[in-house]
Structure formats: C-alpha cells, structure tokens
Image: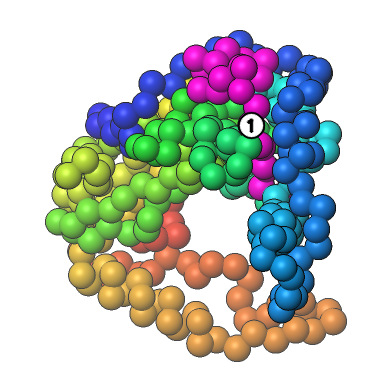
Amino acid sequence: MKNWKKTAVGLLAVSVLSAGLALPVPADAAAINQKTAAKTEYKDGTVVPASQSEAMRAAAKEQVLSKYYITSGSKLNKFVALLEGLSPEKTGLNAAQPYFYRMDKALTGNYFYHVKAFTPDMETLAGEYFMAKDNSCVFRRFPEDNSIELLEGTTDKLLKKVEIYPASVIIPLKSSGKVLVRVPGNLPYDLTLTSLNENIATVTEENGQLNISGNARGYADILAEVEIGGYVKSEKLRFAVMDERDIAAYEARRAYYASLPIYIGADWGWWGHHHHHPGPPPRPHGGPGPRPGGHGPHK
C-alpha cells in the first residue's frame, strides 16, 4: 500500500453548515459593493475631459465585472453573510474593515461558487473562497502556496463528485501505469493505492508520484482511495499487464472491428455486431496472458 499526499494541507472537518445559511446580510459589505459600482457608462472611443478619466476607468471595470462576475444580489449576499459570520482567524478578513466581493458567474468544477474579497479599491486580494452549491462545505484558498483549508461543513458530498479512473487499462510489461483523480475545483487530496494482486502488479513511488508497475502478464486489481477532509472514497480498478505481442494482437482486433460497416435499418437497428465494444483479442501465444474486454486470464 502506498500513500501520496497531493499537497501539504491540514484539512479539518468542522460543524455542518446551517440549513439555508439564513444569516443577516452585513450592511457594510452590501454598501461597499454598491458604492463601487460605476455610475458612468463606458463606450469605446468616447472622448471625455481628463477630470472624468477616473470615472470612465471605473465604468470600464464595472462593465467587465458585470459580464463575468456577480457583484450584488441574494446569492452573493448569502455567501458574504456566511463568511462574515465565521471567525476572522478562519477567513483572514478583518471584521472592522469593509471589502468588495465578487462571485464568478460560472461554477468552478461545476460544483463550487468561487468568491474573492478585495479591498474597496479592488486592487488588493484579501481572501479567496469556494462554497459548494449544495451548501455542504466552504473552503479558503491561500494564493501564496495554492493550499486549501476547510472552513465549514463536511466533505462527504464532495467526495461523491470525485472521479477515480486509470490513465489506461493496459500496462506494458515491465512498464508502469497511473491512476488519475478529478476533484471539483482541483482541490488537494490524499491518494492511497493498494495492489490486490502483487504477483502481476505492484505500487511504486517515484518523484512523489504513485505508479503501478507491471511485473507479469495478467490482470491486477488496484484499490484506489481518495481522502479529503476526513472522508474517503474508494474504487477498485482493473489493469491488464501485457507484453508486446499481447498489445499488437489487441490493437489488430480493435482495427478490424473499427473497419466493419455499420448500417441503420428500421427493423434491425444498429447492424454489424451487437456489442458496443469489441470482444477480447485472441491469445497471441501461450501463457495466462490477459485479454482486455474479458473477465480474466485466458486459460
């Protein structure tokens, strides 16, 4: 069993978010966002007195902000209320200082609302945060080292969105394969890999990366476990360790099926072969080698 920490962060699960996050909206935060909004309309090529250049500059910024970001409204206010309801030690925000907040219109990883807090002049970033769209967890990001800290909630629902899959199901003999992990928002995680058939493949570590080394022809099941914030999601992945002749036979069979014509008929539907995936390639030579698509070594 090998364990790999993607990045050094101390994720600590804390109390679950209150239902609906029904917190009062701080007047200071709403006032700053409203005050920052430009009253002048910006148009390309407009000639104005130099005394109005600052107002036009602010209008240009506001125009771009409204296209890509949410700077007002109930959705942003709810998140601001949550942040300002947490301790300054967690958020890094000074309770006595006003901030300008903006939220990305597009969800990050199709799961997180991404919010940044700036000083009122919008020049200095004071904090960066991610809130799950199901209100299950809130994270703070530290730009200086790209680390992430869980501020509120739990990560069990987040882990249901995590994808674990092999880079390729085929591992060349005496070579290696990888397990890939996709986390919404590209949050850090701990990955643990365990080979359930070490005669065929073993888990090794090289330069901080976990690899699956193919030792002998056959199938190997790898147990992959991803941990975030005290919760773990596991997947059992099957790899086929193949030598050069195995791979050549497999590719030849794939090419053969790809060349078959496929017709559409009212009564026959898809015609040509009934399987969406080509069957296992024939065993090229003796021995218990793998046949991708099958259920075990060919006898």
Q: Disc 1 on helix, strand or loop?
A: loop
- Nearest the viewer among 274 and 119 is 119
Q: Amino acid at mark 1?
A: Tyr
Q: Which percent across, then down, holds residue 209?
A: 24, 44
**Quarter of the rendering occupied by the N terminus:** top left
- Which of 87 and 262 lies nearest the eye of the viewer? 87
User: What stretch of residues is rendered in magenta?
Assistant: 84-105
**Does 134 lie within the magenta span?**
no
Is residue 175 visible from the viewing direction of this image? yes
Q: Relative to residue 128, is residue 247 drawn left or right?
A: left
Q: How is the image coloured?
A: rainbow
Q: Position of residue 154 (x, y in %)?
A: 58, 20
Q: How many marks?
A: 1
Q: Position of residue 249 (x, y in %)?
A: 31, 74
Residue where numbered disc 1 is placed: 99
Residue at the image point whose x is 43% and y is 57% from the top = 294
Q: Residue at x 81, y 18 (%)?
A: 24
Q: Nearer the viewer, residue 253 or 100?
A: 100
Q: Is residue 60 left or right of residue 128?
A: right
Query: Which residue is at 76% across, 47% downward?
Result: 37
Relative image position of residue 227 (x, y in whole percent): 43, 27
Q: Is residue 147 left or right of residue 78?
A: left
Residue 102 against residue 50 in the figure, above or below: above
